[in-house]
Amino acid sequence: MDVAGTIQLIATMTEVVIAFVAFLIGWKKKKLYGWFIAVTFGIFVIFDLARIFALDVAADKYALLLLIACLSMLYAMWLLWKGE
């Protein structure tokens, strides 16, 4: 595995950890923003796995997933701003 592949793998594993911790924040701490952060980073993991395994995903599906991830994080940030 080359350096770029190693970095990509480390980044993906980090995203998995972030998604899991955000899931725990949503579930255990009952914080709604945790669920939205988990969704965002879960989608990022899907992006990375599709790239790592060279899966054939249509561009419109990628675009839709990116929009969902962005909106999810935007809502999570709004909840944090409100102090929820």
Image (spheres, helix red, strand yellow):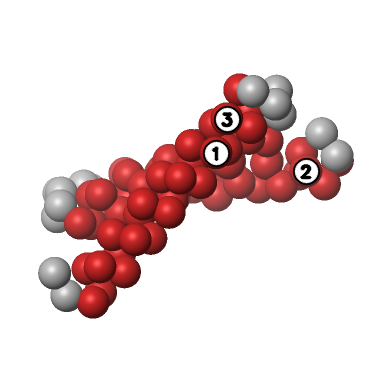
Residue 34 is left or right of residue 56, and the answer is right
Contact flag, marks 3 and 1 (Cβ < 8 Å): yes
**Amino acid tagged 1:** Val
**Amino acid tagged 2:** Leu
Mark toward the viewer: 3 or 2 = 3
**Amino acid tagged 3:** Leu
Residue 52 is left or right of residue 40, and the answer is left
Q: CA gap, disc 3 to disc 2?
A: 16 Å
Label 1 sits on a secondary structure element that is helix
Q: Position of residue 79 (x, y in %)?
A: 76, 39
Above or below residue 41? Residue 3 is: below
Residue occupying the point 51% across, 46% down: 18
Residue occupying the point 32% across, 44% down: 46
Q: Which residue is mark 2?
A: 80
Q: Earlier in the sequence, mark 3 or mark 2?
A: 3
Front residue of 69/14: it is 14
Q: Which residue is mark 3?
A: 24
Specify the label residue 61 is tagged with: none
Q: Which residue is mark 1?
A: 21
Q: Position of residue 39 (x, y in %)?
A: 50, 37
